[in-house]
Amino acid sequence: MPHPVVDAIRNGAAPRAAKLAAANGLLPLAPDDSLLVLSTLVHDSDEEIRTAAQASVTKLDPAVVLPIARDDRTDPAVLALLCTANSDPSVTEAVVLNRATPDAAVEALALKTTHPHILEALTINQQRLIRRPALIEAILHNPHRTPEAERRAREVKAEFLEKEFGRRQVAGERATVTPEPPLKSAADLVPEAFVETPTAIPSVPPPVTSMPPPAGPPAAPPSPPPVTASTPSGVSAPPPPAKPLKLSKSPPVAMIQQGKAPRPAKLMVAQGKLPLAPEDMLFAQVLLTADADTEIAEAARASLSTLDFNTLQPVVQNPETPEEVLHYLLLHPSLPERFGEQLLLHPALLDESVLEFVRQTRSGYLLEAVTINQQRLIRLPALLDAILENPASTFEAKRKAREVKTEFFEKELGAERVAREQKARAAKFAAVLDLPPMPDEAFEAEFQSVLAGFEAEVGQTFSDEAPSEADADADFEAMLAAIKSEEGIDLRQATDPQTQERLSIYQALARMSVKERIFAALKGGRDVRAILIRDSNRMVSTAVVKNPRISDAEIEAIANIKGINEDVLRIIAMNRAWVSNYAIMHNLVRNARCPLNFSMQFINRLQSRDLVNLTKSKSIPDALRQAANRLVAKRRETGG
């Protein structure tokens, strides 16, 4: 339940004395509530309050703030505050790595930070760099950037923003994001508004068959109208079957869905006067735009006319967002292109909603985004004709629509091609992974599910395109050379069955796409993990350490690999269970690729003998060696 003092301060209803006490940290608030209050007070119009709040932020204990900074459910205003304040470097890095941190705050940090490792951390979230190109420029213009940070920023800029096909690649494949826990609805605290007997006509929102006048936003029905799809050959496909009503978890919204809410309660919701959670309020108001009561419907439309799409990222990122809300937002006349692109990737978006959108949009960019989802075009062929008939369609959108129409309908090869691809993928992995036998369709479902979860976790999509023969051969030769260098074994010359089997695994992995190698890294056995941990693609190597079957002995060996990707070492260093193992922690400190902020933390735990050896190492950074020398001297003074 929200704290009343916090609500009062954030709503501007608190007296000046209470705000000043909160700004000075004198109120007995929990750390997260205190930060929420400070995020409001640092922008207060009263200079004394504002100055006190800014001073309190700099005095916060990093050990208390760090868990809040890492939690992706933390309020964006708090994350922005921690990002822009002169916080402890470990707190700043945690905020930067948090996907919920506002892009604007991250960009402001990139312009002013003097910490090189923070600039490197800024390049880890590739999706944020693509979404906000100004962040790339901020990193490249910061004089404190490291060569690695500059290299990553330039790679993203060249690959996604400067090449001719960059914009289409940003649209990418459909990505799913792990849903945040739903906010507790404040309407649960005021159920009395929903208990009186309705006196007005029950308003079960009827299906909408046409859009309202262009002057206002679209009215969204409880479920978009069924569309009879015409195939390119002119044969009509049957409408989709009616689906059962999926009730909201919020009781007030569920009552509106069922037509059981009393008129006064519906009017309060339509006017935004009932304390519902933001996503529940949006859903309820979208439902009420189709209410039979004109006053309620107009009030709901008026409330929705002021939508700020910048605040709706949690809605578009939540796979459980109701299809009615997605339908309404997609058909909104003020839909920004970048937001519309994300909506089109949402797994719950109905094909019929996309068809209605394609018939009315004037955005060539979004029409191209529609053609990215080839499966949708195959499911609803009417989309192909709508894209080709829309005067706003770009050359690229029409080209893709014609390709799908020719390949999957005029040649009638769609189903056969999908089946062949699934069978080929299952056969490819049968020689590499020790998975239980399963049908090709079940394996494909498992493959897509695992990859969707990984892509949601890292905030990035990956190519499923197989490498060329030349690239596969080059990868294979590089793998063999690495084994010969590290183990002194020439796999080509070996004749024993075990080594021959190992060689076949190398050949299979070298011919896999990035997506397939990530899946192998997440699901493969010890031999597969040992190969892929050295993969040149950092996402493949980081997937290895996220394999649930990986052992501490493997982590210890990985931490000792000198040429390992530093993102792998960062993940290991952030895992408390692993770094509680002395051997793993010791290997991290000795590895020059380990991020310096973690190495600095770990040297205090080294035994004196290992610490002395560290001072003699020529491979570690100078700053770490100097810190080790100081610590050795201090221990000798104290007899430690």
Image (cartoon, rainbow, N blue to C red):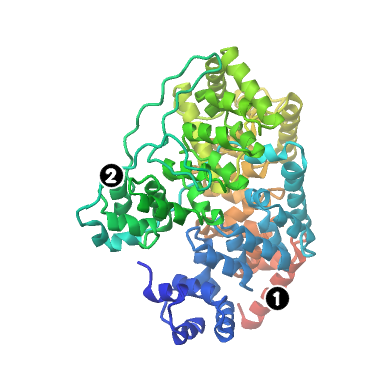
Q: Amino acid at mark 1?
A: Arg
Looking at the rendered structure, which numbered label has been put on residue 619?
none
Crowding around mark 1 (Cα neighbors within 10 Å: few <14, some 14 to 19, many 20+) is few
Nearer to us in this view, 132 or 123: 132
- Asked whether the viewer can see residue 393, the reply is yes
Q: Secondary structure at mark 2?
A: helix
State the image coordinates of residue 108 (x, y, percent, origin top left): 68, 65
Residue furthest to the top in view is: 411
- Residue designated by label 1: 630
Q: CA distance from mark 1 to mark 2?
A: 71 Å
- Residue designated by label 2: 258
State the image coordinates of residue 374 (x, y, percent, origin top left): 57, 28
State the image coordinates of residue 272 (x, y, percent, origin top left): 40, 60
- Establish if 134 lies above or below 422: below
- Asked whether the viewer can see residue 547, the reply is no
Q: Residue at x 68, y 54 (%)?
A: 123
State the image coordinates of residue 447 (x, y, percent, origin top left): 51, 32
Q: Amino acid at mark 2?
A: Gln
